[in-house]
Image (cartoon, rainbow, N blue to C red):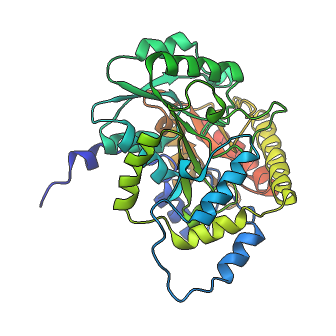
Amino acid sequence: MPRISQRGVDMPASPIRKLAPFAVAAKQKGIKVYHLNIGQPDLPTPQEGLDALKNIDRKVLEYSPSQGYQSYLDGLVKYYAKYNINLNANDIIVTCGGSEALQFAFLACFNPGDELIVPEPVYANYMGFACEMGVNVRTITTKIENGFALPAIEEFEKLINARTRAIMICNPNNPTGTLYTKEELMQLRDLVKKYDLYLIADEVYREYVYSDEPYLSALHLEGIEQNVVLIDSVSKRYSECGIRIGAFITRNAELRAAVMKFAQARLSPPLIGQVVAEASLAAPQQYHQAVYDEYIARRNCLVEGLNKIPGVYSPMPMGAFYTVVKLPVQDSDDFCRWCLEEFSYEGETVMMAPATGFYATPGAGKNEVRMAYVLKIDDLKRALVVLEKALEAYNAR
């Protein structure tokens, strides 16, 4: 039998989805599974987007331009202006989700063997894309005890060498829910400028910032306008994960030209997805406020409930809709699998993402999991009860 590629061997499995077969098996046994493992919002998509989908009136579902439809690009310019991010349409390339935007960034910014510096725990797909492109990831470990704040900038600088091409951040952060401070971002800016690196910023969760301070985007940082690459997506903003629409954004014309070659090679971003995403730009402020308020309530419910369970600790996330949680277990991979394969309480169990998959450092995150507070509050409350019972039973074995 022919061998698969070494790249296929090395590609890490998703910590978010790798336990899915166990969840399927649990459901087939009649067990209800509370999905805390994946950031799939259950809140409604804007009606404007749903109406546009229902009322598509085209005789041909054609290729769109490789950069995306001009009307959608123009709409995005107005959207970003609301955050004082001043762009023109040429700065934006529409992609097949934020994932393709990341792939384009890695393809255009790195040669095989180049290095990327990123704080960990880190969104696991960053490491997957790096593996695909032959990019070496070097991580800066952040700690749950101080809310996963960035370590001293000198720790970043120690990792910089002739192969270093970029620093990458997710702000607000997936998986930790951390929101980086202005001071942290300014220090990163100075380092990027000093060594002429790229700063790749995943800002998919900018709508969900639980702070009174104005949101500071990487595109607000002065002096590195040509160095910043912004990754964006409508998946979480409008609960539109399935339409696969994202954006690669940079003011660097040379970099955009390189990315456009890759964009042309994949032909075009999804036509129907762009129709829905463009219509969703008209969602009223009431929609966004209602979603924001709901996530605040869910965050408070989950985190306050977690911290009442003996031996469990979660910092209070200041953005996105995730938290990394320390559990009184020695092996979160085993515990998460056991919850699905061997445990149920009154016919119910919980599914979480083991945090080991969000670290590159061997052995890190062994007693941590990532949880997404994307379930309604009644379900979160019940999941907390089931989790406490699971911990009691697991540790009493």
Q: Quick one: 321 or 325, which is closer to the camera? A: 321
Q: In this view, does 95 lie above or below 321?
A: below
Q: Is residue 144 left or right of residue 260?
A: right
> Could you tell me residue 363's position as x and y percent?
44, 27
In this view of the protein, can residue 54 be seen by the observer?
Answer: yes
Q: In this view, does 40 lie to the left or right of 292?
A: left
Q: Which quadrant holds residue 161?
A: top left
Image label count? 0
> Could you tell me residue 327's position as x and y percent?
63, 33
User: Furthest residue to the left?
Assistant: 1
User: Furthest residue to the bottom?
Assistant: 59
Q: In this view, does 147 lie to the left or right of 342?
A: right
Q: Please identify the quadrant where the C terminus is shown.
A: top right
Q: In this view, does 159 lie to the left or right of 296?
A: left
Which residue: 34% across, 60% down?
A: 265
Q: Is residue 273 above or below residue 74?
A: below
Q: Quick one: 289 or 40, which is closer to the camera? A: 289
In this view of the protein, can residue 362 be seen by the observer?
Answer: no
Which residue: 40% across, 17% down?
A: 160
Which residue: 40% across, 57% down?
A: 263
Q: Is residue 386 above or below residue 317?
A: below
> Could you tell me residue 181's position as x and y percent?
70, 24
Q: Please identify the quadrant where the N terminus is shown.
A: bottom left
Which residue: 41% across, 16% down?
A: 159
User: Furthest residue to the right?
Assistant: 286
